[in-house]
Image (cartoon, rainbow, N blue to C red):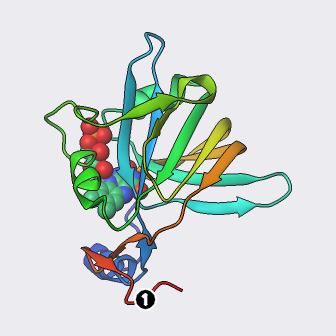
Amino acid sequence: MPLASPAIDSDVFRHFCARFASGVTVTTVCDEAGNPHGLTASSFTAVSLNPPLILVCINHNSGVLQHFRRASHFAVNILNDQQQGLSNQFALKSRDRFEGVPWRPGHGGSPLLDDCLAQVECMTHKIVDAGDHAVFFGEVVAARVADGAPLLYFDRAYRLLDSVP
Ligand SMILES: Cc1cc2nc3c(=O)[nH]c(=O)nc-3n(C[C@H](O)[C@H](O)[C@H](O)COP(=O)(O)O)c2cc1C
């Protein structure tokens, strides 16, 4: 049985986390049979420039986690302000998330979604289990960017930038 935590009330912590504005990604992976999998994830962070490392956190309850644990590579697709529907599609459990979504395989088969704001392809560098999430560190092997504005998430709602230079 876990020891009682001296930490703050979990609702207070949730409210705190909701105050951090983030972008939104669809983080993807390919299984041994070549099938694509992915989930909406806002926990993306750039970690290191040299070597180029990023991380993304995946809940231990996520149905797609097993595929990320087995794969050699994964991809992070950063969504633009036209892709809120895609974010919802990849956060729902009960459907084929890739239905109607154009994509192509990148390194290690990792699915690269069309028309994203930016993408990185990563070789899995390290997986650290921390609390109720698995933290995936990826070494970036390819990256591309496009023009456009990001989809944002803040206070449990999608947001758009007021202005993009
Ligand atoms: C905006 C947004 C951000 C999310 N960020 C994460 C995240 O960083 N990590 C995570 O594990 N789940 C995150 N989720 C939840 C997952 O997308 C979703 O719960 C999960 O895919 C459930 O389906 P699964 O069990 O089939 O994977 C996020 C959902 C939304 C809508």
Relative to residue 127, is residue 18 drawn left or right? Answer: left
Looking at this view, name the residue that lies furthest to the left: 94
Residue at the extreme right of the image, as rendered = 50
Front residue of this view, candidates 39 and 89: 89
Callout 1 crowding tier (Cα within 10 Å): few <14, some 14–19, many ≥20 = few
Up/down of 99 relative to 143, above or below: above
* Viewer-closest of 35 and 135: 35
Label 1 CB less than 8 angstroms from ligand 1: no
How many marks can you see? 1
Percent x, y for residue 104?
47, 29
Q: Where's residue 10, x and y in %?
A: 30, 73
The answer to whether residue 52 is above or below residue 97 is: below
Q: Is residue 156 left or right of residue 110?
A: left
Residue sitting at x 61%, y 24%: 108
Question: Can you see residue 1?
Answer: no
Q: Residue at x 26, y 61 (%)?
A: 84
Q: Residue at x 37, y 84 (%)?
A: 19
Q: Which residue is mark 1?
A: 163
140 and 149: which one is in front? 149
Q: Is residue 63 above or below residue 152?
A: above
Q: The C terminus is located in which quarter?
A: bottom right
Quadrant hosting residue 123: top right
Q: Amino acid at mark 1?
A: Ser
Q: Position of residue 51 (x, y in %)?
A: 84, 51
Residue 33 position by quadrant: top left
Determine the residue positioned at 37% across, 80% down: 8
Under circle 1, the secondary element is loop
Instruction: State the residue lying farthest toward the bottom.
Output: 162
Residue 96: x %, y % from top left: 21, 30
Whether residue 51 is visible to the viewer of this picture, yes or no, is yes
Using the image, determine if residue 18 lies above or below residue 162.
above
